[in-house]
Image (cartoon, rainbow, N blue to C red):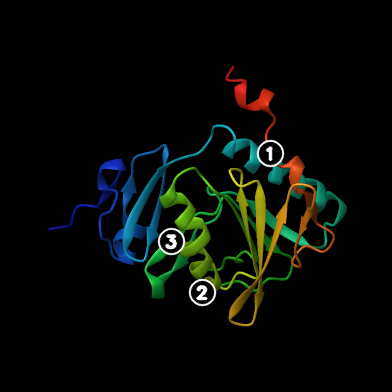
Amino acid sequence: MATATFLMSPATRGRSLTMDEYLDADYVEGYRYELAQGVLEVTKIPKGRPHGRIVWFFTLRLADYHRDHPEIIDFFGGAGEYHLVLPTMVSGRNPDVAVTLVGTPKDADGERPPSLAIEVVSPGKRARERDYITKRQEYLAYGLREYWIVDPVARRVTVLVRNGDAWTERVFHDGQTASGLVLPGFAVPVAEIWPTPEDENDRA
């Protein structure tokens, strides 16, 4: 008799899963499902402000960069396009934004993995720990060359650049311009990232 497929939903948050169970599971739509070292995390897809506007800001900036430098970016997208699987850590992640470079070799599944990921920190202690600590470790293990942590509460951008088996960290605040190494010339004035009060109050 066939075993029923596991259904991921908000009610299954905190459930222990193997990698195979996670990858084979069905899911209730409207939520993001990530596996954190064997434990299922469930979060509502952050479409609202300011999270959604910040993701959109980076999407537009990357589109502009790709238009001016078509020889560098092969593809970029969000959580719907990228699923970073780390079998050795029993983890699976869907970054807010990720970038694949031209010339990146294909992996065992025939996909070209990203070199850069951007996460926008959601409110709450658990979300901050996930982006600042857990994903910092996991993205290094995955093999990313660069990881940006965009924090609208602290109004800062932490750029982590791979240096061998460790990260080199730089922190940028309002009045500074955030940049890394993976995308030469890609620079973002930090103060321009955050939604204006008018944006945040506009719920129409």
Residue 197, image quadrant: top right
Residue labelled with disc 1: 194
C-alpha distance separating marks 3 and 1: 28 Å
Q: Pointer 3: residues within 10 angstroms few (<14), some, or many (20+)?
A: many
Question: Which of the marked residues, 3 or 1, is nearer the chain's N terminus?
Answer: 3
C-alpha distance separating marks 2 and 3: 12 Å
Image coordinates for residue 3, horizontal then vertical, percent: 18, 57
At numbered mark 1, what does the secondary structure look like: helix, strand or loop? loop
At numbered mark 2, what does the secondary structure look like: helix, strand or loop? helix
Point out the residue furthest to the top here. Answer: 204
Total marks in image: 3
| Residue at (31, 60) in percent of width and height | 39
User: Is 4 left, or right, of 181 in this rendering?
Assistant: left
The label on residue 141 is 2
The label on residue 92 is 3
Image coordinates for residue 54, horizontal then vertical, percent: 65, 41
Tag 1 near tag 2, CB within 8 Å:
no
Q: Pointer 2: residues within 10 angstroms few (<14), some, or many (20+)?
A: some
Question: Which of the marked residues, 1 or 2, is nearer the chain's N terminus?
Answer: 2
| Front tag of 2 and 3 | 2
Between residues 77 and 45, which one lies in front from this camera angle? 45
Image coordinates for residue 166, horizontal then vertical, percent: 59, 78
Question: Which of the marked residues, 2 or 3, is nearer the chain's N terminus?
Answer: 3
Q: Relative to 5, is 193 above or below?
A: above
Quarter containing the N terminus:
bottom left
Between residues 173 and 19, which one lies in front from this camera angle? 173
